Each structure stands twice: as C-alpha cells, then as structure tokens.
Amino acid sequence: MKRIKKFKNVEELKKAIEQQEAARQQEKKKRVIVVSSGTCGQARGSLKVIEALKKALREEGLKDQVAIRITGCHGFCEAEPNLIIYPDRIFYQKLTPPDVRTIVKETLVEGRVVEKFLHRDPLTKERAWYENEIPFYQKQKRIVLGDNVFVDPTSLLEYLAIGGFRPFIKALTRMKPEEIIQTVKQSGLRGRGGAGFPTGLKWEATRRAPGDIKYIICNGDEGDPGAYMDRSVLEGNPYRVLEGMMIGALAIGAREGYLYVRDEYPLAVRHVTLALEQLYKAGLLGEKILGTDFSLDLHLAKGAGAFVCGEETALIASIEGRVGEPRQRPPFPAQKGLWRKPTCINNVETWANIPLIMLNGADWFSSIGTSGSKGTKIFSLVGKINNTGLVEVPMGITLREIIYDIGGGIPEGKAFKAVQTGGPSGGCLPASMLDQIIDYESLTAAGSIMGSGGMIVMDEKTCMVDVAKYFLNFLRDESCGKCISCREGTQRMWEIVRDITEGLGQPGDLELLEELALATKEASMCGLGQTAANPVLSTLRYFRDEYEAHIYEKRCPAGVCKNLIRYAVIPEKCTGCEACKRACPTGAIQGTRKDVHLILYDKCIKCGACLEACRFEAIEAQREEAITIVREVKP
C-alpha cells in the first residue's frame, strides 16, 4: 500500500486526485484482472483464487504486464468467486484455484476465451462472454454499486482515482450549507433505511435546531434476515459513505459523528476502520480540514446485533452505552438525539448517494425513478431465485423484471408463489402482483414496505402460514419488550400461527389474528411493533385459503407443516434408485435396488430429505390423517 500524505489544503487534494486519475488512465493500457472478494466471495474461496492467480502470473512471466485489483462485492453473489479481465470485460464465474491457472494460460497467454467458466443464463441457457452481456446486470442502474469494480476498498488513493472527494471539495469551497441542503431536497432523495423520509427535510430540521453541538450518524445496523446491502456497500466502497457523511456534516453544522455497524460484519468493520485511519492521515478528518475552518471527527461504534437498534432512538441509546430501546417521539433526533443534542441519522445507502448528487446535480438524480420515489434502490435478491445477489435498480421497475429478467426466474422450473419485501416487518406479495412497480407508495398500498431492501423469493413449495410463523418468531425474539402491545402482541400472534401449522387451529383464529395484528400495529411505540403485523396481514390478505386449509381441512397445501403431512412413495413412479434411502438420516426407508421402496412412518421424522433427493417425483407429501386436536388453555 502506498504511503498516504497529509493534504494541507484543497489545491493539494485536487492535484492528488488529478494524479491518481491520470495513473488510472495509464493503467487502462495494460490488462487488469478484477477479483470480487467481499464476504460472499471470501466464503466461496476468493482468497485462495487470488493467491493462485498471483502465482500463475509469476509462472507465466506476466506479473509486470497484468495488474490485479481486489475489490468488494460486484453484486452477483451466485457467480462467486468471479473475476473480470479488462479492457475486454471478460467475465468468468464460480472459479477455483486450478481454474485461474487455466484462465491465465488460455486467455492471457494464448488469447482464447474459456467457455466453461462463462456465465450461462438459467432461462435461455446461452453463455455470456462479456460482463455487459449478462442479463443479471442489463436492467440494473448501478450508480452506488457500480464503482465497486474500480476500487480497492482498502486504499484511499484508489478512491481518488475515480474522482473521489471531488464532491466534497465542491461542497466545501463552492456551496453554502443551505445550498447543500437545498440540492438534496431538490434531488428527492428519501431515506433508504425503510421509512423513506425525505433526506433534505431531515438535514434542514437538524440545521435549524438550536444548539452549537450537533452530530451525524450512519446507521449500518442491518438486521433483516437475508439482507446485506449496507454490508456490501461498506465492504466495497467505504470512502463514498464517509464522504457523504462529511458533506452532511458541512450542511448541518456537525463536528462529530458515528458509524454504527454491527460487529457481525467483520470485513465491513475492517474496511471502515482502515478508511478512517487513512482519512485522518490524509488530513481529511480532524481539526481544520484542508486548512479551512471545518473540523470533523468520525468514530466507529460496533453494535451487538440487536434488530431493534436499527430504530434510530434505540441506536442512539446503544451508542450512549445504554440498553438499545426506543423512546417516545417527539422530540425527534433532529431536535434531541445523541446526548440530547440535535442529530441527523441516515443509513449507509442514503449517505452513499450524497456524493453522487453533489457531483452530478439534483436534476440528474431526480430524473431517475418515479414522481414520488427518486433514484435507485439496492435490494438483496435471495431465496428461491436462480441469480442470487445484490441488485440496484431504478425506482419504478416491476417485480417481474427483478425476479425474471435480472434474477433469472425460479430454480428447477418451479412456479413463483410470493416475494417478501421489506424484511421481517414487510409483507408477502403474490404472483398476481408481479407487475407491481417498486416504489414507496405502491408497496405500502399493497400491504408491504420498501424497508431497507430485503427481497425474499418463494416458490410453489412454500407454505405461507409457515412463512408468517417464521417472521413472527423473529420479531417476538427481537422485540425489546418495552411496550406491552409489541411484547405480548408478537408473542400471541406467533402462538396462534404456530398452533395453526401444527394442526391445532380452530374456527375464529383468523379473526383473532387480524384483531391482534391491528392492535399491535396501532399501539406500539416504534417501527418494529408498528410493522410487526405485516407478515400476518399480508399473508391473510393474499393467501387466506392456505390458512383455512390448515384450520378446517387439517392440510398443508405446500406439504411443509410436519404435523399435517406424511411422506409416501408413489409405487408407479419409484425406480428403486435408492437416492431417497441414502438421503434418509433415520433409516426410515426400506427397499432394494430397482424395487419399489417403502417409508416406515414410525421412524420418519418428516425432514423432507427424501423428497429433495428423488429425481423422479416418486415421493409426495400427503395429508396426515390422524391429528389429535389439543390446545393448551391458558389462564
């Protein structure tokens, strides 16, 4: 890593940016191999791939002719570990150390594309040779994530090479605080943390709040199951987030701020720590930055993983060293926040958009999206989907475009059933709403929320009652318990849905569920309780027939709820291949090769391993005939 010099004034920083940009242009004259190595890449072996790549380049005498850039996540998590060879933009995916040795020899030395490492589209089965040909990227608009491929997240100089800190210089030298705020207001940027409150209005309220001491906070407490948008932004380009905070501090008059990141994100914590260290060494944080009167100190605060700390007043309590519990509002944090001082809190993605708005202008940003929801939104696309990953799309895109055009559809040709948006407090939308556009107002009207950007896709084998039970279990566990409506409401809703999945549902349960859900929503103090009813209300709204089948027919239509099913072999389809027998963990399947097999019900634990293993659809989940209806009566 090159030594960071301290920039004494704006002109020195401008000169360094120009030098790094020029060096990047020179770099384009030789080949560069970009390796995606975020958490997802490292989990699938990217670090071993990088070592093998370095060794192969040395052995072929290409060490000085080919540069390696190690970056954060490029979004296409399903394809990890992957690399891109520039300037050709050849994209190779799912690589192992032996694979990169082949690539170096075949592509770099002999000039041939190795087809077996190319991406194959799950729908058309066609191979894509180049990055811009891959359907996963074609309908995205990657204004926040797009630069990840060009930046080593551990190097300030790499960030300067793509024009980093030009927006900060513009805000520092050419704009008054009121002008910065007005630009953000005109852009239409809304908070990407879930509520969608206009960012400029929040900044304006904080600036106007009386007091000489003010704070800014980056909310990186990302706790939704299946969501990892903020983590990947912090891992892949922490400097953009920090630059956004610096511009925000200029606007509201803050001299101190915190990045609150959960300690469960070790790579994000490491990259943010390195970025802060380099910014202090460069004189971009601390006293009298670049020789001006502007001073700012930013600190890293690590959270312990409490979901409720995503709520801003609970997060503030955690930073202060208190139990992470929400408090009543008003006063809002913009009036009385951290240590009772005016505080501006935005999430990671919101801060990352600020430098782009300063650089390109409010009109540029507001030209993207819909009338009420401007810009792009990053979603984590997970679940029963072929192309798992992070997608950044313009507001106004449809669910169908995300799930099929970008996500590649449902694995194994199964039918799409539902998508859950907005995290555990979001809602489940059915196949009839695939053409629903994505923006704040439309999702709320449909019974869901934007949330921070989690998007979980479900196929025909998903039980929606079981899904509601899962999210209610998460919410009751994560409720801080401060208000009785949330503490008892989530618990009681979970108990009723649990009983329904176990065959103990009774007439009147659905009406009671709806009553409890609405009471919890109306009486709870913070966003966790106010949205905890969404999994129940949305599944009742769109999948009520599944609840009724569980209660009145004692049947799980999806064949998921163990107490309502038993697995059976269909004799005419069984080939005797013994795949189910090998998969069974309890020895509950009997039969010899090429003979019809039999499931012993007294040994079967209904794990579903046999169903997954069978390639001939010879095993099915049938209705369990003998269910004893016993419900515990509580005093």
Image (cartoon, rainbow, N blue to C red):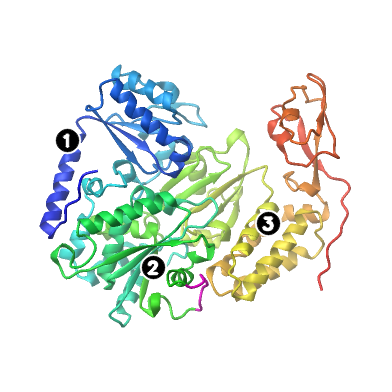
The quadrant holding residue 269 is bottom left
Q: Tag 1, which secondary structure?
A: helix
Residue at screen point 25% across, 54% down: 278
Residue at screen point 49% across, 66% down: 309
In this view, the residue in front, 59 or 635, is 59
For the C terminus, which image quadrant?
Answer: bottom right
In this view, the residue in front, 44 or 528, is 44
As measured in the structure, the alpha-carbon distance from the residue carrying label 3 to the one carrying label 2 is 32 Å
Q: What stretch of residues is rendered in magenta?
A: 322-328
Q: Which residue matches tag 2?
A: 345
Q: Is residue 224 above or below residue 616?
A: below
Extreme residue in the bottom direction: 210
The quadrant holding residue 140 is top left
Q: Is residue 477 visible?
A: yes
Res. 217 mark: none
**Which is more N-terminal, label 2 or label 3?**
2
Q: Is residue 204 above or below residue 559?
A: below
Is residue 324 rendered magenta in the image?
yes
Please state if 542 lies on the left or on the right of 338 as rendered: right
Q: Which residue matches tag 3?
A: 469
